[in-house]
Amino acid sequence: MAGIRDREKRHFPLQQIQDVVNLFKDQLSDSDEPNLAFLSIVLGSIEHILTVNRAVPYNKDASKCIEPIFPVIQLDTIQALYAKFVTLVKSSVDLTRYPGEFATRELVKRVSDVIWSGLTRAYYKDRAHLQSLYSFLTGNKLDCFGVAFGVVAAFQVLGYKDVHLALSEDHAWVVFGKDLKETAEVTWHGKGNEDKRGQPITVGVAEKNWLYLNGQPVICSREIEVAAIVSAINPSINATTDSVEMGALQQELLWQLYDMGHLDKYPMALGNLGDLEELCPTLERPLPVQIFEKAIESSKNYYNEQHVYPYTYLGAYHCRKGNYREAMKAWADAASVIKKYNYTREDEEIYKEFLEIANDLLPNMMKSVAGENASRLHGTSILHDPEAYANFLRFYDGICQWEEDSPTPVLHITWAKQLVFSLGKFDPKVRNYIDIHGEGEEEDDDEEDEEEEEEEEEKRRDLEKKVPQKEVSKGRKRKRSHKNSENGDEYETNH
Ligand SMILES: CC1(C)CN=C(N2CCN(c3ncnc4sc(C(F)(F)C(F)(F)F)cc34)CC2)S1
């Protein structure tokens, strides 16, 4: 990998968002590969100044923070950090021992160890702003995405073209070798799990496993690796305030990547862009729903519809907008994806998503609709809508199927209580308008079925009277960055 050339230097000093957009545009249209380490250091240094160490204090009391003007990023700052990374990587690997054109598993493990040993012993792994090489080089801290990205950036510095980032919806690893046939773990996952660094991700591991998307992860090109670091930008200053400038930069860079076609195979980046557009719409650009639909199309076209998040992005959006019919459909579609998986102990993130939908968002939705007199009286609300009811049943059927054959149970009493609560809100008449027979089942409309139905209804009403509905919370903080947790507990990684 050529170092920082005049081609990069002439963009400095970076004084405004457009300067950074031009730098990325130049890097992405260059015949040579975009320089991953360099771009990660640039983004990390801007994010640091706009979120972590804000030069201009924002006035806490006023709702609007005083945004500092865009920080001036000097070339020598970036050059010094880039040189530090190149020196660390090149001095830690004796390439004469690895003569081949392609990386070997031993070398992948070695480079992963170089990044791993550059990390401080114990720190809050889930904290924000730990995703870039700026964090690695100035604070010796990386989150799990950052470690995987750091390994790929290090291989680019070493001159390898075959080592690329592989991304699922909650884990990252690398592919390498001729035709990218090899895979290797290079980072940890979650809390309290032994890291499996150096091991391949075999078919047996990935099959029906959400953490590996059943063998359908995003296999990044250099350009999609750039999209990953842009998508990993975290504009949050604290739990309640975002840097307007950082969010604007992320949005501009994502549109730049979108226009160049580099988001076509990256559903989560499209989802992130849709969320940003909801916050701050860009004139003459597609609407958030259209962007979320593109993420769904991407999953259908390139990943055999194995990705869940495209539907949960869309469902959350419709829920926020009060489009409850559409939210119900999106969540039923999400459950129709997850049902193909077996739930295992490392799938907490997607479990929390469905838990929040079933036990918080859905019940609150049913409650607020039940309260709306007008639509209820005119029967236009979802409580009278057979389509909504069918999607409601499809949602729960998907979750039940997810649990079937899984080594870890999904459902517990709270799920059942909330199901009864939400189900009971539908007008009993909707049942007459949907056909829920599976393929090949006989149509049975005889008398005793009706009585059975009535008995069921009786039981449901009794259960509802007995089951006190505890107040449900206003919902979990939405995931922002690649790794995100409310409490960010500290835990040791074993390095
Ligand atoms: C619908 C949602 C609940 C809202 N935000 C969601 N995000 C936010 C952004 N996000 C992401 N957005 C872009 N790219 C990636 S790659 C990745 C990961 F593979 F898990 C990694 F690298 F291990 F962290 C995560 C992720 C994770 C999922 S899902």
Image: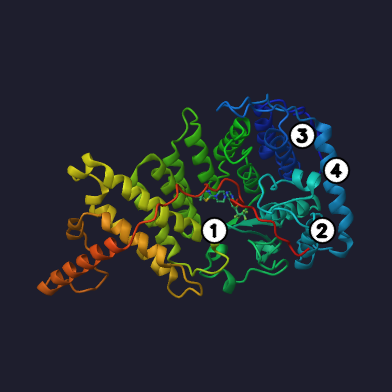
Q: What residue did someone put label 2 on?
A: 117
Residue at 60%, 52% in the rendered image: 485
Q: What residue did someone put label 1 on?
A: 349
CA distance for labels 2 and 3: 30 Å
CA distance for labels 3 and 1: 39 Å
Q: Is any part of residue 421 visible from this angle? A: yes
CA distance for labels 1 and 4: 37 Å
Labelled pair 4, 2 in contact (Cβ < 8 Å): no
Quadrant of the rendered image containing residue 323 = top left
CA distance for labels 2 and 1: 27 Å
Labelled pair 2, 3 in contact (Cβ < 8 Å): no
Q: Earlier in the sequence, mark 3 or mark 1?
A: 3
Q: How is the image coloured?
A: rainbow
Residue at 21%, 44% in the rendered image: 376
Mark 3: which amino acid? Answer: Glu
CA distance for labels 3 and 4: 14 Å
Residue at 28%, 61% in the rendered image: 464
User: Circle 2 — which element?
Assistant: helix
The response on whether ligand 1 sits within 8 Å of label 4 is no
Left or right of 46: which side holds 265?
left
Mark 2: which amino acid? Answer: Ser
Mark 4: which amino acid? Answer: Ala
* Residue 137, position as x, y percentages in the image: 80, 46
The response on whether ligand 1 sits within 8 Å of label 1 is yes
Q: Earlier in the sequence, mark 4 or mark 2?
A: 4
User: Circle 3 — which element?
Assistant: helix
Q: What residue did someone put label 3 on?
A: 8
Q: What residue did someone put label 4 on?
A: 83
Mark 1: which amino acid? Answer: Glu
